[in-house]
């Protein structure tokens, strides 16, 4: 059985600064030379929120992840299955923003597979807000999919 | 500026962008830009040890390219929602075609929105990702 008791578990708070250099480098990695990404107040590319914790962390707070060691096992293939971003109210993230993100394990569920195996889904959601105004800016929703072959190990129980 | 707002869009309209054949250098560049240094994306030796023919691209690189089609069409700050499912890996040499197709139009919160279906296919027509997006039309 998927570790449904994880549903609702908070993952902590992160604080990031959106910096100019990383935004340009990220756009270049997507082969996008649009000059819009070169300014002091440039908008971020649409998928940049996924990498904000890597570039922008101030070494304060920080988010826990899924308990990945509990999810590994024989016959269990762990994949980044789905990804979603919701950009709130047209308040697009820009260079210079200071954003605070609260993470939560928002959903855990499973589905049967026709081969007798199953799929487990672990969804984490981080909502980033403007630190100054509290306005929600962008929500990133990450779905870890575990493809379990028939007879695969079950996840290891949580210790706490 | 590529921020081409287009008030004439209608259901069924579509845009496609084709990207240059993927290279290991592109994967390394994305690794550096994203902080994702999973060796499956840059170290052939390790990728082959676990049964892959070679390194393969980051799913988030493919999603970033899919997002470009919507961004190039409707503008850098136009997207309101973007969702994908990763279905197939992408490999060095793959030529990716990203297509966005208008599936609906509506008004919400004082904005005119278009809903889009997204697909990224390789040169054989295999779908690497499928998804949906919503963009504001100015």
Image (spheres, coloured by chain):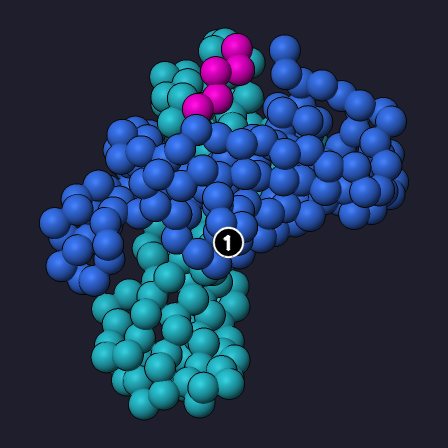
Q: Is residue B94 magenta?
A: no
Number of marks in the rendered image: 1
Residue B28 placement, left or right of A107: left
Q: Secondary structure at mark 1?
A: loop
Q: Which residues are magenta?
A: A31-35
**Chain with cyan colouring:** A
Instruction: Classify A41 as above or below A71.
Output: above
Q: Where's the C terminus of chain A, which quadrant?
A: bottom left
Residue B61, percent across and down?
42, 39
Residue A76, percent across and down?
31, 75
Residue A160 placement, left or right of A99: left
Residue A91, percent across and down?
65, 29
Name the residue: 37% across, 61% down: A79
**What is the quadrant of residue B108 in the picture?**
top right
Name the residue beneath numbered marker 1.
B126
Colour of chain B in the image: blue
The answer, for residue B96, to whether it is visible in the render is yes
């Amino acid at each position: 059985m998927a570790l449904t008791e994880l549903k609702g578990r908070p993952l902590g708070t992160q604080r990031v600064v959106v910096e100019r250099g990383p935004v340009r480098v990220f756009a270049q990695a997507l082969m996008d030379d649009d000059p819009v990404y070169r300014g002091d107040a440039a908008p971020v590319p649409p998928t940049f929120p996924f990498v904000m914790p890597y570039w922008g962390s101030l070494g304060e707070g920080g988010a826990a992840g899924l308990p990945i060691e509990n999810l590994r096992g024989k016959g269990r293939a762990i994949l980044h299955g789905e990804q979603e971003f919701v950009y709130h109210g047209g308040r697009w993230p820009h260079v210079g923003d200071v954003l605070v993100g609260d993470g939560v394990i928002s959903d855990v569920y499973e589905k049967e597979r026709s081969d007798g195996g199953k799929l487990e889904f672990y969804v984490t959601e981080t909502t980033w807000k403007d630190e100054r105004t509290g306005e929600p800016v962008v929500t990133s929703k990450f779905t870890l999919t575990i493809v379990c072959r028939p007879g695969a190990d079950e996840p290891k129980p949580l210790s706490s | 500026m590529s921020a081409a707002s287009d008030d004439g869009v209608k259901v069924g309209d579509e845009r496609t962008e084709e990207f240059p054949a993927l290279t290991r250098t592109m994967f390394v560049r994305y690794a550096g830009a994203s902080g994702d240094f999973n060796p499956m994306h840059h170290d052939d030796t390790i990728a082959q040890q676990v049964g892959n023919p070679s390194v393969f691209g980051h799913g988030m690189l493919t999603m970033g390219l899919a997002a470009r089609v919507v961004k190039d069409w409707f503008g850098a700050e136009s997207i309101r929602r973007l969702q994908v499912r990763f279905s197939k890996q992408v490999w060095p040499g793959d030529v990716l075609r990203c297509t966005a197709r208008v599936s609906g139009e509506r008004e919400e919160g004082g904005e005119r929105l278009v809903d889009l279906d997204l697909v990224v296919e390789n040169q054989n027509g295999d779908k690497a990702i499928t998804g949906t997006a919503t963009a504001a039309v100015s």
